[in-house]
Structure formats: structure tokens, C-alpha cells
Amino acid sequence: MSLDYLLNPENWSLANSAGFPQRILEHLAYTGLALALAFAIAFPLGLWIGHTGRGAFLAINIGNAGRALPTLGVLMLALALVGIGLLPVTIALVVLAIPPILASTYAGIRAVPPTVVDAARGIGMTEPQIALRTELPIAAPIVIGGVRNAALQVISTATIAAYVGLGGLGRFLFDGLALRDYSRVVAGAVVLAVLAVVIDLLLAGAQRILVSPGVTGRQARRVTVGSKS
Amino acid sequence: MGFFADVIRYLQINGETVLQALLEHIWLALLPVLIAFVLAVPIGWLVVRVKPLSQIILAGSSVMYTIPSLALLLLLPGIIGTSVLDTINVVIALTLYSVALLVRTSADALGSIDDAAVQAAVSMGYGPVRRWFTIDLPLAMPVLLTGLRVATVANVSMVSVAALIGIGGLGQLFTRGFQLGFYAPPIVIGLVLSVLLAVVADLAIVAVQRLATPWTRAGKTA
């Protein structure tokens, strides 16, 4: 396994429009765009379905069906329908990211103990307040878990953008395969894998910051560990 | 109507290729799950039993699952010395993902076994081996099979990625549609067959689950 391409400083130059920094930025841009759109669609819907209990069938089945849909096929179908460009890639990635966000938001809200919701209602909170200030904070770890899941899948699938002539880290993979330059393929695959792991760690960090310390169970766990020893 | 006629015509002309792609897809997706199931149960058992190992194994499996499938498919040949076009890469890559996913569920499954049932078995004189196969494993089955459903469906959809580097399965119908200038019939046939396969495999595991764990049904109706 040759690491020449990966370690060549020229490929890491910011000025090189086909170098790693540029491709990483493109890759993150496709990923961010798709995640933002998917979140804007799936999160409010999941919150509403979870809070009202209406359409639970929809949330569960979109979650399951989404896992079964091969994204490559969705991308090709989108290309056949709307033509080549950023739009079909974004459509395919959004279709990929909606199910995990929708399913986890719904599941997180449903998992909130009914007594807590009753208590919130009892002290006079309105329904939107209950959803946003009581259910959401308690469901936050599960919701963010769904977003992490979606982000991972989108990062790993955004490589297909390069298959249809766009940028991103997939370029190193497909160009390398076409040119029989395995060193380039390895470089692209390594950078892609590291990027996925780093983004996942960053989101795990965000989870620690965003989730209220009373909810994570971190303190509770610390107490049990202490009492055992 | 024209589109359906195109789909039927495509199937008439390329029926054999489509069938071959489907069969290849089936074994490429399901073989790794079977191997992974056999591997993951003992690893899950280790995770439950040996505390220092559990952190390493669980962290390792979550990092494993984070690695993008296309990257792994292309890195594996360099690591294990196969050719990029070898189907064994797909089998190994998907086995690694399935193990990563199933280790966690089998640890959960084996960790959640009711201690009273185990103690009852021990007091009735069950030896460790007999206890494991007749008490522990059946009680862990519902959670194990739930994990297996997730892994199976994920694999069926992941196999198509292999087509990007020229390895078989229904994904080849997608790349065929691409090569024909985004010709929709093979793409739609591939999508429908892939989703159908995932649904059928999922239902098959549900059926096994109902047969293998009759007490879960008994509890619900009572």
C-alpha cells in the first residue's frame, strides 16, 4: 500500500484546486447542505409526530424504508429525472439523511416518561412549550444520535458526487481507479475515513455540550462507579 | 405507460443479467451477516464477561462502523493483498461492518438475561455448556435477532456501493443506467428489487424470531 500520494505536500497545498484541502471543503459543503435540508424537514416533523402521537406509523416506516433504499439507485434515478448537477446529488443525500433524523427524533420524544409530560402540563406549560422545553431536552441525546448517524452516512455517500462529475473526496477514488493509480485511491480513502471519524468525534463533543448534564446520565454513572469501588 | 413498457422490454432483453445481479446481490449481502452473527455472539459474550476488554471492543466497533464503505472497499485490497475487483473484499468489508453492529447488540442481549433464570438452571444442575445453549442463548435471541434485522437491511442496501468499483450485485443496474445516459428502466428495476430483497429478508428474520422465541408472543397475548 503506497502512501506517496497522501504524503506529497503538493497535494496538501491550499492553492491546489485539486488538492486535499479544497476537496475536503467541497465534501463538507455537500454534506452540510444535505444535512441542513434533511434536518429542516425531518426534525420538526419528528417532533410533531412524537409529541402528538399522530402519524407514528409514518415515522416508523419511513425510518425502515429509508434504511433499505440504496442511495446509489436514488442518485441515478434523480439524475435520470432532473439531469446532471448538484441538485440530484443533494436530493439523493437528503433522502438518505431524513430517515435516521426523523426516526430518532420521534423515538426520542416518545421515550420521554409520560409523568414528566403530565407534570409540565400540570404547571401550566403550553403544548409547544412542553415539546420544546420539556420533551426536547430529555430526548436530545437520542435526537443528536440520529443526526450523528445521518452525518456519517452522508459523509460516506457524498463520494458519489464525484462519480457524476462533481468535486469532493470521491474524486481521488474515482480518478485513481480510472488512472490505475492505487496510491491516489488509498490517499482518498484514508482522508475520507479520517474525515468521517473526526466529524463523528466533533458531533460527540457537541452532544456533550448541548445535552443538559441532568439528562446525560453521566453524573449518575459516576456515582454508581464510585459506590462500586 | 411508455415507461412501464420500457421496463418490461428491458426485463425481456436483459432478464438473465438482472437475475444474475439479484442472485449475486443476495449472497453478497447475506453471507457476511451469517459469518458476522457467528463471530459477534462470542465477542459479545467477552464484552459482557471481561470488563477491561469491553471498552476496547465497543470503541473499536464504533470506529469500524464510522469508516465509509467505499473507502473500506478500496483500502482492504492493499491491506489483505487481494485485487480491487475481488468479490472477497465486499464479503470481508460487509462482515466487518456487521460484526461491528452485532457486537453491541449481542453484548446488550447477553447482558440483559434474567439472572433468576440462570440461577434456576444452575440449581437444577445444568452444566455451563448446556446452560449456555438452552438458557442464555434462547433468552438473548429476541435482542440478537433485532440486531440481525438491522444488519441485514443495511447490508442489502450497502452492497450496491460495490458497483461503483465494478463488483456485482444489483448496483450494476444503477451503473448500467448511468452508462446508458441515465436510462431509467434498469435503475428502477434495481431499486425495486433491492428494496424488495431487504423487505423479504427482514420478514424472514421476523418469521424465524416468531418460531424461535414463542414465549415473547405468549407474554403479549396474556
Image (tube, coloured by chain):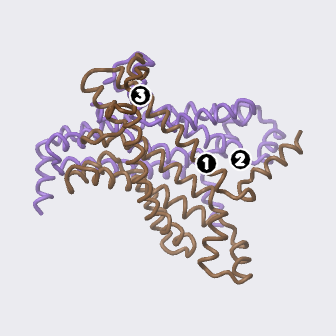
Characterize the local packing of mark 3: few (<14), some (14-19) or many (20 or more) Cα atoms within 10 angstroms.
Answer: some
Residue at figure coordinates x 43%, y 30% from the top left: B72
Q: Residue at label 3?
A: A12
Q: Which residue is mark 1?
A: B143
Asked whether the residues under marks 3 and 1 belong to the same chain, the reply is no
Quadrant the N terminus of chain A occupies: top left
Outermost front residue: A15
The label number, if any, that marks residue B112 in the structure image:
2
Pair 3/2: label in front? 3
Q: Position of residue B170 (x, y in %)?
A: 28, 41
- Which amino acid type is shown beneath numbered disc 2? Ser
Q: Which chain is purple?
A: B
Q: Are marks 2 and 1 in contact (CB under 8 Å)?
A: yes
Residue B135 visible here: no
Q: Separation of disc 3 and disc 1 at Cα?
A: 46 Å
Q: Amino acid at mark 1?
A: Val
Please, is residue B38 above or below residue B194 in the view? above
Rendering coords of residue A30 (x, y %): 37, 48
**In the image, which disc is placed on residue B64?**
none
Q: Indicate left or right for A81 with A156 as reference.
A: left
Label 3: state its secondary structure: helix
**Looking at the picture, which amino acid does disc 3 mark?**
Trp
In the picture, measured across the screen, residue A46 lies left or right of residue A183, that is: right
For the residues beneath circles 3 and 2, the answer to whether they share a chain is: no
Element assignment for label 1? helix
**Foreground tag (3 vs 1):** 3
Q: Position of residue B57 (x, y in %)?
A: 64, 32
Which chain identifier belongs to the brown chain?
A: A
Please name whichever residue, A179 or B111, is drawn nearer the observer in this view of the structure: A179
